[in-house]
Image (cartoon, rainbow, N blue to C red):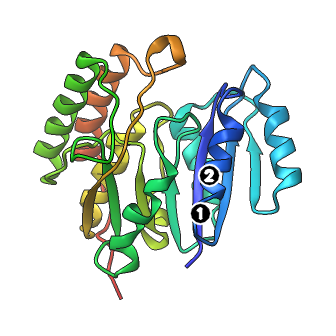
Amino acid sequence: MKLSVVMPVYNEERTLEEIVRRVQATPFDKEIILVNDCSKDGTAAILEKLAKEQSNVRVFHHAQNMGKGGALATGFSKVTGDVVLIQDADLEYDPSDYPVLLRPILEGKADVVFGSRFLGGAYARVHLFWHYLGNRALTLASNCFTNLNLTDMETCYKVFRREVADRLQIQSRTFAVEPEITAKVAKLRVRVYEVPISYAGRDYSEGKKIGPKDGFIALWAIVRWSLFSSIEPLRRK
């Protein structure tokens, strides 16, 4: 099994080298696909350095900012692995959770795995009540439309068998990509598992980018991708 780790990157010069080091430390045959979404800091130079020094690191640059969804769309189009995993470039999500995330797929039980921050992972930072409440409300709204019983739709950690990732055809260009992916996964009628993960959330002074406006965008995305899009169910072999 070859793992493709897709990592959108925007102005993450402080954490980029460390998160790549942590991903490299995981015990899997892997490629790391880093998509620079037109960063304005020193991110681009760090990316080129990483690609030069590490043979399994592949770097792609956007000439203009296209948002997390755009970066994921680029990354998904470049993967060569059997399993695709989304990783943020900050240090909120811990790559040491990869074995837990991958286990349902490796055991042949799942096609998609969501890593939930609310199922009791090894640790979670106590932090930002209104952000937590917004996440739970959006997950509830998403579940009402998709009929999936998720606890954390907005999680970064989503893992897909390659056949599923190839079918998603991401179109969102903002954080609306999370409800878009979830709605499309539900329409594919694939086997979805959820596992507990650790979480060390940042606050806004530390560079957190998502805000209240993104909640309203996500709510509309839930309705849009659930009611006004179509995708044929995946036929498993």
- Of 42 and 167, nearer the camera is 42
Question: Residue 39: x percent and y percent?
Answer: 71, 26
Which element carries disc 1, helix, strand or loop? strand
Q: Which residue is mark 2?
A: 75
Q: Which residue is mark 1?
A: 4
Report the residue at 24% width, 16% height from top: 130
- Of 52 and 121, nearer the camera is 121
- Of 112 and 66, nearer the camera is 112
Specify whether 154 is left or right of 174: left
Report the residue at 61% width, 53% height from top: 23
Question: Residue 36: x percent and y percent?
Answer: 70, 37
The answer to whether 217 is drawn above or below residue 89 in the figure is: above
Rounded to the nearest angstrom, the CA distance separating label 2 from label 1 is 9 Å
Specify whether 178 is left or right of 173: left
The answer to whether 167 is drawn above or below residue 17 in the figure is: below
Number of residue marks: 2
Which element carries disc 2, helix, strand or loop? helix
Specify whether 198 is left or right of 64: left
Specify whether 221 is left or right of 144: right
Callout 2 touching callout 1 (CB < 8 Å): no
Is residue 36 at least partly visible in the picture? no
Which disc number belongs to residue 197? none
